[in-house]
Amino acid sequence: MAAVQKSRAFLKWAGGKYNLVDAISRHLTPADTLVEPFVGAGSVFLNTDYPAYQLNDINADLIALYQLLKNRHQSFIADAKALFTSQSNQRDAYLSLRQQFNLSQDPYERSVLFLYLNRHGYNGLCRYNLSGKFNVPFGSYKKPYFPEAELHYFAEKAQRATFSCSSYQQVMQHTQPGAVIYCDPPYVPLSKTASFTSYARQGFDLDDQAQLANLAEKAQQRGVTVVISNHDTTWTRKIYQQAALHSLQVGRSISQKGSGRGKVAELFAVYQARPAPVSPPVIVQPQKAG
């Protein structure tokens, strides 16, 4: 059988899972719905085949863009493409459009600019300051790629998806049997200087990491399989001790220095669904006549 061509996300994304889709898919069970509390760029969504998807992220700009693509992709793609010109690929133009994005309250305008900033900003980062302002510097790329085919494919597949901008806690707590959950949280830092959690203003700390593991255990007890990916560290192995653990060596996707783009250990924590407890049958004793 010929290998299936994988589909790339239209966004550049720190920690994107394009190269790990096959490894992740091996741990995902058949289900009616795939739930992703941290959808990010959507590589797992794009490269799996579930009847339905529930895709969530705390980044409101990301979810607004996805909802818009689902419902108005033709006009969006045309308007976004108009910004991919040599004139717009200048530092001054980038800073001006970044300011326009930060001042705008119009969801459509913000979505068009979000894609522009993602493809023209440094390393495809998505980062906000404490005031909620997008602050990624200019990327200085020769000719940023406009992902037209990828946008069309996402829009087509998005017809199977519902999008939400909620907390991971809400999503995990409300998922019922019949679904499988894949979690791609911001990873535990490998060093004090390697932390990258500012893709949304709220951040994601070690307490969140532990709480996510606890919610996965509770979902497992309700009959829902949960798969979580993270760095393979002593600490993650401790918080995921109730799961089946699988480790894999992978290459870094983003590093400040080329020499730092070596192999790191990726950990998959698999909480296999437990059958829902069955209540014993109630035996009714027949009443004696008379």
Image: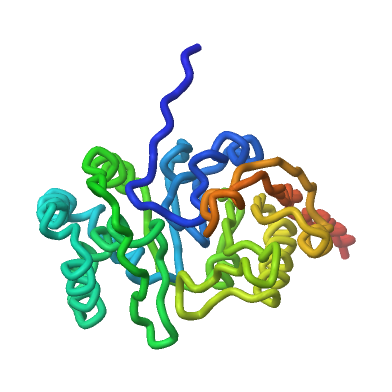
In the figure, 238 relative to 149: above or below?
below
**Residue lying furthest top:** 1
- Quadrant (top left/top right/bottom left/bottom right) for the C terminus: bottom right
Q: Is residue 9 left or right of residue 259?
A: left
In the figure, 164 relative to 225: above or below?
below
Query: Residue 132, how many percent across, how many down?
Result: 38, 82
Residue at the location (55% across, 71% down)? 197
In the figure, 26 relative to 267: above or below?
above
Query: Residue 50, how many percent across, how many down?
Result: 47, 40
Q: Is residue 223 left or right of residue 125?
A: right
Q: Is residue 251 left or right of residue 45?
A: right
Q: Is residue 75 visible?
A: no
Label count reads 0
Colouring mode (rainbow / by chain / secondary structure / one colour): rainbow
Splitting the image into 4 quarters, where does residue 97 fall? bottom left
Q: Is residue 63 visible?
A: yes
Residue at the location (50% across, 80% down)? 202
Query: Residue 175, how many percent across, how many down?
Result: 57, 61
Query: Residue 86, how many percent across, how many down?
Result: 13, 53
Residue at the location (82% across, 57% down)? 242
Residue at the location (70% across, 62% down)? 190
Q: Nearer the viewer, residue 105 or 157?
A: 105
Q: Is residue 108 left or right of residue 163?
A: left
Splitting the image into 4 quarters, where does residue 121 fall? bottom left
Q: Nearer the viewer, residue 89 or 250?
A: 89
